[in-house]
Amino acid sequence: MPESTPQEQISRMLTGYWLSQALYVAAKLGLADLVKAAPRSAPELATATGTHTRALYRLLRALASVAVFAEDEQQRFRLTPMAECLLDAPGSQRALAIMSGEEHFRAFGDLLYSVQTGEPAFDRLMGAPVFDFLQAHPEQARIFDEAMTGVHGRETAAMLEAYDFSGVRVLADIGGGSGSVVSAILKKYTQMHGILYDLPAVIERAAPRLAAAGLANRCQAIGGSFFASVPIGANVYLMRHIIHDWDDDNCRLILHNIRQVLPDHGRLLVVESVVPPGNDPSFGKLLDLAMLVIPGGEERTAEEYRKLFHATGFELTRILPTTADVSVIEGKKFPGQA
């Protein structure tokens, strides 16, 4: 096959949202679940979803052309491995497809505003910062929780492979959301206890999940704001995809609050994408744009993390890459500082 020309490559990039929105519609309509048991035709699926038969067929045909669903000779559609990622099931990408296709898609449509001002487009479009918006919209908050679990699930396994949590007495997961990360760690390290800390509304959603996982007796679920304080009692404080949500001033406040309660021999673990130098492809460089337009944060380089840690009394001791798109950034308190 001849190599694509620059014009062809740019054309595919420019029309990328055609496909992302097609995936969103398929996820929103629950098409993967409707063909899970057996292939079904567009008329059958249109009846089940209340959609226009011909238009739905055209959507499915387009998705089948990129191996999301497959069409047989009777014009029926069945699951493919990629279509299975849109099933309504734990760890799937369905919630991410819905979230990405709704508020996040609108925010990216106003990327120019963010580039011109440095401010998140989400706030202007939705009338509130993203986490305030989620508190006021329970259904979107539920989808957000599921999306984060689905998109970051592989990162948890990669983190556990890369970092040895042996010897951790109590692990505090700060901004831990649904509790999926701390649950996975506690299940592997059965002598460890945990603290899940997030906004009260988030903890209200997460507590039943901890109980269902059999971890209610080993993991406290505490509600609060990490801008005000964090719980005492842990010797390791973990944050995954928290620091990247915020600008440097807010990050320094969060890290300061952790330092106030961290024991002298405790550890700080920040799990994030670390932006590499040069022009090589990096998911973190694209995720950085999402941080710009949605929460107003940013992805950072190793040197930027080093400076951020230093400014709040932490020494960056090491950065451990993982097989996923994140690294474990470890820090400890500088000795002798209050």
Image (cartoon, grey):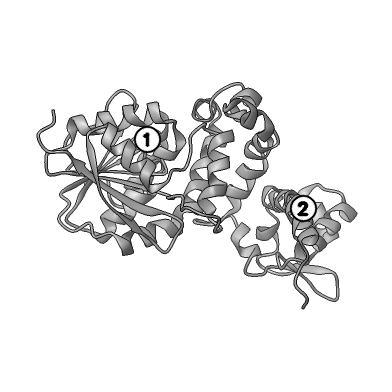
Q: Badge 2: few (under 14), some or many (20 or more) residues near its Cα, within 10 Å?
A: few
Report the residue marked by disc 2.
48
Residue 53 is situated, as x and y percent measured from the top left of the image, at 87, 54
- Tell me where residue 216 sits by quadrant: top left
Q: Is residue 293 left or right of residue 257?
A: right
**Foreground residue among 302 and 246:** 302
Q: In this view, does 142 lie above or below 78?
A: above
Q: In this view, does 186 lie to the left or right of 92?
A: left
Instruction: Please indicate, yes or no, whether residue 138 appears anywhere in the rendered image.
Output: yes
Instruction: Please indicate, yes or no, whether residue 230 appears anywhere in the rendered image.
Output: no
Query: Depth-wise, is mark 1 or mark 2 nearer the camera?
Result: 1
Three-letter amino acid code of the residue under disc 2: Ala
**Foreground residue among 88 and 280:** 280
Q: In this view, does 51 lie to the left or right of 38?
A: right
Q: Which residue lies furthest to the bottom in this view?
A: 1
Q: Residue at the location (77% across, 53% down)?
A: 48
Residue 311 is situated, as x and y percent measured from the top left of the image, at 28, 32
The disc placed on residue 203 is 1
Q: In this view, does 183 lie above or below 254?
A: below
Q: Badge 1: few (under 14), some or many (20 or more) residues near its Cα, within 10 Å?
A: many
- For the C terminus, the quadrant is top left
Assign a secondary structure to mark 2.
Answer: helix
Three-letter amino acid code of the residue under disc 1: Ile
Residue 171 is situated, as x and y percent measured from the top left of the image, at 23, 46
Q: Residue at the location (32% across, 60% down)?
A: 160
Q: Residue at the location (31% across, 23% down)?
A: 228
What whole-number distance in Å separates the C-alpha atoms at marks 1 and 2? Answer: 35 Å
Residue 292 is situated, as x and y percent measured from the top left of the image, at 55, 35
